[in-house]
Amino acid sequence: MRVADGAESRGWALGCTCGKCRRRIVLFRDSGNGRGPIEAPLRGEFGFACPYCSSDNTINTRELVRFQLDSGAQTDGGLAA
Ligand SMILES: [Zn+2]
């Protein structure tokens, strides 16, 4: 059995880019860990405020993108409770 050291701590996220400040916003944890279809816990459109610039964004879950979190670097954001 081979375990890639550090891979566990990175994790994947689902999110989008803020329409105003263009920063990457983490909205959900990716339950698929970077594999398989993107599965969001919600469907359809929802709104949220950007954690960086407080701008109101509306996104459809079909527009979510998946990205890998840098280890420890950008885990402060995130709206997932
Ligand atoms: Zn923003």
Image (tube, helix red, strand yellow):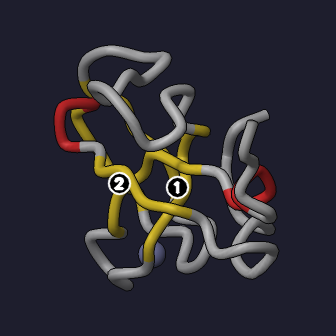
In percent of width and height, residue 51 lies at 62, 66
Tell me the amino acid under the disc marked 2.
Answer: Asn
Q: Quadrant of residue 75?
A: bottom right
Q: Earlier in the sequence, mark 2 or mark 1?
A: 1
Location of residue 39 by image quarter: top left
The amino acid type, in three-letter code, at marker 1 is Ala
Q: Quadrant of residue 35?
A: top left
Q: Which quadrant: the C terminus? A: top right
Query: Which element type, helix, strand or loop, lies under badge 1?
Result: strand
- Image-based side of 30 in relation to 77, left or right: left
**Residue 73 percent across, percent down from the top left:** 74, 81
Residue located 80% across and 68% down the image: 76
Residue occupied by mark 2: 57
Q: Is mark 2 within 8 Å of ligand 1?
A: yes
10 Å crowding of disc 1: few (<14), some (14-19), many (20+): few
Q: Return the residue at label 1.
A: 49
User: Where is residue 63 drawn, in percent x and y?
Assistant: 19, 42
